[in-house]
Amino acid sequence: MNLKGKKILLRAIEKEDIEFLRTMINDETMERQVGGWSFPISKYEQDKWFESQINNTDSIRCIIELEGSPIGLETLTDIDWKNRKACHGIKLYNEKIRGKGYGTDTLKTIMKYAFEELQLNKLYTTILEHNEVSIKLHKKCGWEIEGTLKESVFKNNRYIDEVQIAILKKQYEEIKEQWK
Ligand SMILES: CC(C)(COP(=O)(O)OP(=O)(O)OC[C@H]1O[C@@H](n2cnc3c(N)ncnc32)[C@H](O)[C@@H]1OP(=O)(O)O)[C@@H](O)C(=O)NCCC(=O)NCCS
């Protein structure tokens, strides 16, 4: 099912979104803000990746849609169905749409789905130490820092620490009361 937030919609990736995703993953500024990295991705490779995702039950990737247009990507990856946990990722592509609450809306929406539908017990992610906005976003939604991964990522000619941050279902149950 599609996941409705207050303003955004989380829906499956369609073929029409492939170029949007390719633009986002090839964007240098975006790669500097997130822990992941990739070589330049061609149209052919992006198409192949899209095909490979069919029937993938270890990950859920949703387009973040606003008023009918894609604005970003929301992911739950490395889903561990036994230990009930998954790694969370979020990217809003255009800087103009950042800082307007769509990240918060997206995160609350995927948390509700992960805990109340998928029956996960823990969500976690790592955030580059200088990505203050992402750390603030997660803390605002009840996530707690578990520790620091020292010199975990190499970007822009230097090693960068990553913050490991997570939320348990019981913490979600408490904080969601404040969202009503
Ligand atoms: C991180 C990201 C998803 C946040 O989404 P967003 O829509 O911009 O965030 P929101 O508007 O919901 O703001 C969430 C909180 O972040 C903080 N924040 C947002 N914009 C900020 C800014 N420009 N400066 C400082 N703090 C800011 C605020 O504390 C805000 O909560 P508040 O407004 O209630 O105080 C988005 O900026 C993004 O996609 N960035 C690039 C990719 C990325 O960094 N992804 C995360 C990788 S771990």
Image (cartoon, rainbow, N blue to C red):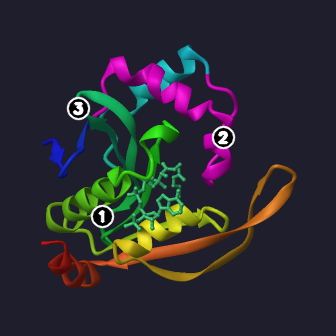
Residue to which mark 2 is pinned: 29
Q: Is residue 35 magenta?
A: yes
- Give whichever of discs 3 and 2 has the lower sequence position: 2
Task: Look at 27% across and 36% down and name the residue there.
Answer: 66
Question: For the magenta stretch, what is the residue range?
Answer: 12-41
Q: In the rendered view, tell whether residue 27 sits above or below residue 113.
A: above
Q: In the rendered view, tell whether residue 162 sits above or below residue 32.
A: below
- Give whichever of discs 1 and 2 has the lower sequence position: 2
How far apart, in angstroms, are the residues tagged by discs 3 and 2? 25 Å
Q: Are marks 3 and 1 in contact (CB under 8 Å)?
A: no
Q: Is residue 116 left or right of residue 146?
A: left
Indicate the position of residue 75 as horizontal and vertical percent values: 39, 49
Residue to which mark 1 is pinned: 81
Indicate the position of residue 117 as horizontal and vertical percent values: 14, 61
Of badges 3 and 1, nearer the viewer stands 3
Q: Is residue 73 visible?
A: yes
Q: Is residue 172 left or right of residue 1?
A: right
Q: Quadrant of residue 141?
A: bottom left
On the rendered image, what quadrant is the N terminus found in?
top left
- In this view, the residue farthest toward the right is 157
Q: Is residue 124 visible?
A: no
Residue to which mark 3 is pinned: 67
The amino acid on which the numbered mark 1 sits, given as a three-letter code, is: Trp
Q: Secondary structure at mark 1?
A: loop
Task: From the viewer's side, name the closer residue of 71 and 167.
Answer: 71
